[in-house]
Image (cartoon, rainbow, N blue to C red):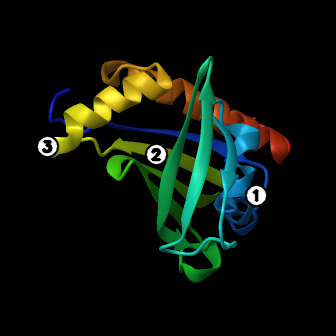
Amino acid sequence: MSKSQWSLEEHIEVDAAPEEVHRVVSDVRNMGRWSPECRRVWVPRPPVRTGSRFVGFNRSGLFVWFTVCRVTALRAPAASPDGSGEFTFDVAVFGLPIARWGYRFEPAGEGTRVTEGWRDLRTGRSARLAGLLGSVFTGTKPERRIEVNRAGMRTTLARLAADFGRGAA
């Protein structure tokens, strides 16, 4: 795997207020309803706060794996002068950094523009091992991860928007 950091973003507009969308998304136990890979999330001490850890149980075809995540940013829209919010967490497997996932919530007319972001954290000396573990556990080679994540993000956001009514990309 190269030393470059891969990242991408996808967005959708949701028919709900930023505060409501932030509240639902930051309750990570909901993630299994939307994500094509994440099946369930266990939060030892809900609700999550900055610094909280949680475990994601994931599946893709015959491949099953878990991740340990830590919330790195949690800012409700009500706490921001412009009405935007944020929810971000880092993902690790066996202590190796894998990715940073995040959501931004911005007012958009009567609803919310939700942006989902992903950044690959498999860099440095542990990158090769992290890439190998990713291939073994998920069945996805590192060079295909951005393609798989883009499709997964689009599915996740469409399902999230459907939960709130209609969504528009």
The amino acid sitting under disc 3 is Arg
**Residue at image location 74% in from the left, 51% down from the top:** 30
Residue contact at pointers 2 and 3, CB within 8 angstroms: no
Dot 2 falls on a residue whose secondary structure is strand
Mark carried by residue 125:
3
**Residue at image location 32% in from the left, 48% down from the top:** 96
| Figure check: 145 above or below 153 | above
The amino acid sitting under disc 2 is Gly
**Residue at image location 20% in from the left, 42% down from the top:** 126
Residue 169 seen from this side: no
In terms of depth relative to the viewer, which is nearer, 26 or 169? 26
Residue 103 percent across, percent down from the top left: 54, 54
The amino acid sitting under disc 1 is Glu
Residue 57 percent across, percent down from the top left: 62, 42
| Figure check: 10 above or below 141 | below
In terms of depth relative to the viewer, which is nearer, 150 or 99? 99
**Residue at image location 14% in from the left, 44% down from the top:** 124
Dot 3 falls on a residue whose secondary structure is helix
Q: Is residue 1 left or right of residue 102?
A: left
Q: Is residue 85 left or right of residue 13?
A: left
In terms of depth relative to the viewer, which is nearer, 93 or 105? 93
The Cα atoms of the two marked residues, 1 and 3, are separated by 47 Å
Mark carried by residue 117:
2
Residue 101 percent across, percent down from the top left: 47, 49
Q: Earlier in the sequence, mark 1 or mark 3?
A: 1
The Cα atoms of the two marked residues, 2 and 3, are separated by 24 Å
Mark carried by residue 110:
1
Q: Earlier in the sequence, mark 2 or mark 3?
A: 2
